[in-house]
Image (cartoon, grey):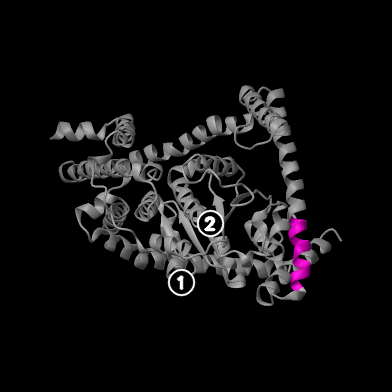
Amino acid sequence: MEKFIYTLKKLDKRWIYLLIFLSCIIPFWYPDMFPQEFSTSKETQRVYDIIDGLNEGDAIFIDWAFDPTLQAELLPMAEQTVKQALDKKIRVFIYYPLLTGISLGENLLENIKKEPGYENIENGVDYIHLGYLPIGVDMVLFSMYSDFKATFGKEGKIFEGIKTFGDIKYLISYAGSAHPETYISLQPRFGFRMGAGVTAVVGPDMVPFLQTGQLDGMLFGLKGAAEYENLRIKAGAEKKFNQKANAGMASLNLSHIIMFLFIGLGNLVYFYERKYKK
Amino acid sequence: MKKEIPLLIGFIATIGWYLEFFMAGKFFENWKMIFTTGFRNVAIVGLLVGMVNVLRVNYKKIKYNNDRWYSVYQMFIIALMVFFGSLRGISPGTPFDAMFTYGFVPLDATVFSLLAFYVASASYRSFKIKSVESAFLLIAAILIMLSKMPLGEAMWSKIPVIGEWIMDGPTSAGKRAILFGAYLGGLTMMIRVAFGLERSHLSE
């Protein structure tokens, strides 16, 4: 036993790195190694229902506050909301508070256009990239409430009937930081409805805003994205094109199991030493 | 006057924006656009200043042989992105976009992904039950992690419910207390800036 404990104590961290690496990679070849069924949280369901309840011609505003570092969790969420809106002929305005997120969003829309059913969507008609503005989000919001179109200096049929931000039916902010709080702090002033899609790390920070009703709903980490994909698949979306978050579920499971294993082993070493090495 | 004018601007802007929140109406609708346009212009100049600063810092490094090759590489990449961006724009299919998609995206994602490895290693070394409090922390952390992975629900259907309770109750209470303190601090800072008691933004 002592030898085993000694080996664990002196374990090179590269073994941990290797196991974590393998636990992330291997499940992509064996996605069915764990049960794939899970329930949908009420926060995810709320976001889905709100967008689903909008009418043709309504507009949603996507606040794309993430860059490639967070794309594993947030890109599938953004993809599903955009597709859901496009399916219902809801106009999609995408604003980028981060410069490094723009190409990510543009590429997503280009890829969506290659999928069956979305070939005819047009930039400036069905969706528009509003770009980046070198001012804070609070200033952007004030400006949008004065003149929505002039704020971004863009043109297109999509702006028809949208004079100020008050004409936008729903705002959803995708972020891996406390960024949505800027909108939340101005929500009492303007009274818009909003939801958020955040990384699993940020999720707990947003829970108080769900409780107060300031956030209508929230997509929470990779599992939230997978739940949203499942909701859309249930509603008739083709599984083949809407599986990015679900494809990571087995990887999420196995890498966490490895984490639990190492936490357990670390504690075993600690308790053994405390008991026998006094 | 070098001090008085910035202090006066600070006073007017702070009180103006504060009142705007409560007295939103036509009177403020007209002049707030001046502020937003002004902010945008200042920010654009700020970007320019930032760019000049990057050039200056790297020029010094190259000149005095201080990590010279990193600076040369950085300057080269910046020049290349500016060149490609100016040449054919940044839309999908352009050389700028190719550099972003095949250069920046994987590099950026890789650097962030390294966190997973560090977190795993750090958990092994330091996530130990040394006291009752740390036992609570560990149990809560494991329950939350289980509730946010499909396997947790497959193991026991109540795991997501427990995870939700932890976040809705203890976590949310702690977060609310932190937020309340932070916003009170923000309000205090606003009053200090408005009345000229806080002068750090004037380099004092």
Residue B152 percent coordinates (x, y):
25, 52
Residue A8 percent coordinates (x, y):
23, 34
Crowding around mark 1 (Cα neighbors within 10 Å: few <14, some 14 to 19, many 20+) is: few
Residue A88 percent coordinates (x, y):
49, 57
Please indicate, yes or no, whether residue B129 appears anywhere in the rendered image: no
Viewer-side residue, B139 vs B47: B47
Chain assignment, label 2: A
Q: Between disc 1 and disc 2, whose residue precedes?
A: 2
Viewer-side residue, A103 vs A270: A103
Please indicate, yes or no, whether residue A33 appears anywhere in the rendered image: yes
Instruction: Work out which quarter of the rendered image holds the N terminus of chain B and state it.
Output: bottom right
Chain assignment, label 1: A
* Circle 1 SS class: loop
- Our reading of the magenta stretch's main secondary structure is helix
Residue at 54% over, 58% down: A90
Q: Which residue corresponds to mark 2?
A: A89
* Circle 2 SS class: loop
Residue furthest right in the image: B1
Check disc 1 and give the amino acid type.
Answer: Thr
Numbered range of the magenta stretch: B28-39
Residue A65 percent coordinates (x, y):
55, 50
Crowding around mark 2 (Cα neighbors within 10 Å: few <14, some 14 to 19, many 20+) is: some
Viewer-side residue, B142 vs A236: A236
Label 1 and label 2: CA atoms lie apart by 31 Å
Residue at 56% over, 70% down: B184
Instruction: Work out which quarter of the rendered image holds the C terminus of chain B and state it.
Output: bottom right
Mark 1 and 2 residues: CB-CB less than 8 Å, in contact? no
Q: Which residue corresponds to mark 1?
A: A212
Residue at 42% over, 52% down: A201
Q: Count every numbered label the image shows and give the total.
A: 2
Residue at 31% over, 65% down: B165
